[in-house]
Amino acid sequence: MRLLIMGPPGAGKGTQAKLIAAHYGIPAISTGDIFRAMQTADTPLAKQVREIMASGGYISDEITNQIVAERLCQSDCDPGFLLDGYPRTLQQVDNLDAHLASIGAPIDSVISLTADEDEVVGRLLKRAEIEGRADDNEETIRRRQQVYAEQTAPLLDVYRDRGLLVEVDGLGGIDEVSERVFAALG
């Protein structure tokens, strides 16, 4: 099973990705986790990523595509995978399509967790308070929601047009959302 999970920040993608991956026996691949792991890796690409992140820059599509392609070639991805945080741009969609076509492994479904923006903002503010995330204030959270709506949400239309999009209400208890995801995936 080859899956993508998408949704606005705070919709529960990371939590659901782990549960979905465990259910299907596939790795959950988070580009955010990969970038964080590169902070201690000793490779030329990791060094380049560290320099970009340290400067506050944006990791280019080219680098992100390369990192994801390398990860998808690892043997644990043979039975499938769940991508979380990728693709985020139309160029990344095209690159992922080309890579998967080259290995004869198309995407099976794209899970879109939907959530009311005010509910998600409240959820993230609570998490920020619990985890001591000073940078997660209402203004930055709403800005991230806006960036998602402008830049990433349009990708949902691409997958909807392909008949791959599975929209699931991301609000509610963790188990409740998981049940909805598994029912939607059939």
Image (tube, rainbow, N blue to C red):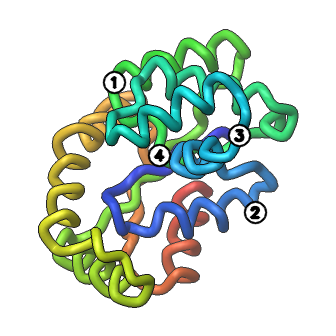
Label 2 sits on a secondary structure element that is: helix
Image quarter where the C terminus lies is bottom right
Residue that label 4 marks: 85
Question: Residue 8: percent from the left, percent from the top?
Answer: 31, 58
Which residue occupies 36% across, 76% down?
A: 133
Q: Select label 3 or label 4 by which is in front.
A: 3
Question: Which dot marks residue 1?
Answer: none
User: Label 2 amino acid?
Assistant: Ala
Question: Residue 160: percent from the left, percent from the top?
Answer: 35, 37
Q: Residues within 10 Å of mark 3 (few under 14, many from 20)?
A: few
Q: Residues within 10 Å of mark 2 (few under 14, many from 20)?
A: few
Which residue occupies 71% across, 16% down?
A: 104
Q: Residues within 10 Å of mark 4 (few under 14, many from 20)?
A: some
Q: Residues within 10 Å of mark 1 (few under 14, many from 20)?
A: some
Tell which circle, 3 or 4, labels the residue nearer the N-terminal end. 3
Which residue occupies 67% across, 10% down?
A: 102
User: Label 3 amino acid?
Assistant: Ala
- In the image, residue 184 sits, relative to residue 33, either above or below, namely below
Question: Which dot marks residue 22?
Answer: 2
Q: Select label 1 or label 4 by which is in front.
A: 4
Label 4 sits on a secondary structure element that is: loop
Residue 5 relative to residue 23: left or right: left
Residue that label 1 marks: 90
Label 2, label 1: how many angstroms apart (C-alpha)? Answer: 28 Å
